[in-house]
Amino acid sequence: MIERPRRLRQNAALRALVAETRLHPRDLVLPVFVAEGITEPRPITSMPGVEQHTLESVVEVARRCVAAGLGGIMLFGVPEHKDATGSGGIADDGILNLALRAVRDAVGDDLVVMADTCLDEFTDHGHCGVLDEQGRVDNDATNLLYAQMAVAQARAGAHVVAPSGMMDGQVAVIREALDAEGLEHVVVLAYAAKYASAFFGPFREAVQSSLQGDRRTYQQDPANIVESIREIDLDIAEGADMVMVKPAMSYLDVVAAAAERASVPVAAYQVSGEYSMIQAAAAQGWIDLRATALESLTSIRRAGAQVVLTYFALDVADWLA
Ligand code: PBG
């Protein structure tokens, strides 16, 4: 036999030398929830190990991210009061903007501070935009609010705004608004290919979403990939600095297609349901938590994602240390 592929697998040092993909804390972004009106961090039952944070505890988490050498932190706000237009997402004293300010003050440029630019956490109907008289999500009216939201987040200190509402034209409107306010340095990370996914389930508890109905008129059909290529091309043409695919594990083909095609860095989001499935199976003793989490994240990197958002980010930094 001339070809013996097993030769390169015979010990850990050889395997490490020829590894094609590496996980590194710098490539990881930790999503974090900050809730208004709580005095202690509050566990999220459906996401073991993940909590809603207070304005004080989120700063501690951000400091831990810096110490762990993570690439970034992505903040989500959970307001005490929600309304039809999600006004708490835009207000300078809204919980997300307060958290961005506190975190940015604490970390400076040692950690990339990202903001979820979307209204669903702030609306009483739970949709990612405002509704018209027929109860449909009004694309263009929503974009105007996203523009204000992005400007408020950038002023609060976000290095990166991440529109996740899947409205047509959202990236262009946000880019234009930022530039008009002298915020041309602020990065837009577009959730370009975002699917109407059942894997977002636990997130609904995390942000206490009151969603009625579903998001299928704006998020993509899991059956499609050509549509993702179109969304990615459009977002890059509109000025996206990075594009994201979400969820990750059931959409590795989309991650790979995006990485092949995009002229900008590609991110992938291992979402709440992906995290919780691994936690739940591990809690039963059916799989090994650490090995499964590391394998899942390695596969997302191997598919072509340069940046990975994951609730395991701090654990991974620990495991790799
Ligand atoms: C929208 C948003 C969602 C997630 C991130 N941004 C929810 C949705 O679109 O339904 C889900 C993240 C996760 O499940 O971990 N603001």
Image: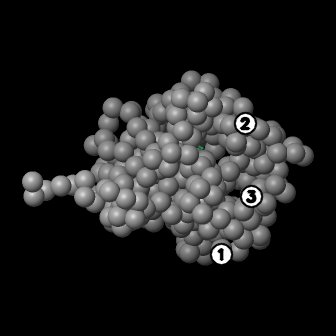
- Measured Cα–Cα span from mark 1 to mark 3: 16 Å
Between 17 and 139, the one lying in front of the other is 17
To which residue does mark 1 refer?
109
SS label for mark 1: loop
Viewer-side label of 1, 3: 3
Which percent across, then down, holds residue 60? 79, 60
Is the shortest distance between ligand 1 and the CB of mark 3 under 8 Å?
Answer: no
Task: Report the Cα–Cα distance between label 3 and label 2.
Answer: 16 Å
Amino acid type assigned to the residue bearing label 3 in the image:
Val
Q: Nearer the viewer, residue 71 or 230?
A: 71
Residue that sits furthest to the top in the current view: 213
- The quarter of the picture where residue 288 lies is top right
Q: Residue at x 67, y 54 (%)?
A: 75
Quarter that holds the N terminus = bottom left
**Type of amino acid at the residue the image marks with label 2:** Ile
| Disc assigned to residue 44 | 2
Query: Mark 1 or mark 3, which has the lower sequence index?
Result: 3
Q: Earlier in the sequence, mark 3 or mark 2?
A: 2
Contact between marks 2 and 1 (CB within 8 A): the answer is no
Residue lying at the far right of the rendered structure: 39
Helix, strand or loop for disc 2: loop
- Whereabouts is ligand 1, in terms of quadrant? top right
Amino acid type of the residue that numbered disc 1 sits on in the rendered structure: Asp
Task: Determine whether the beta carbon of the residue marked 1 sits less than 8 angstroms from the nearest atom of ligand 1.
Answer: no
Q: Residue 160 at what x, y percent from top left?
A: 58, 64
Task: Kindly identify which numbered label has been placed on residue 61.
Answer: 3
Side of 35 relative to 176 (left or right): right
Q: Can residue 88 be seen from the camera position used here? A: no
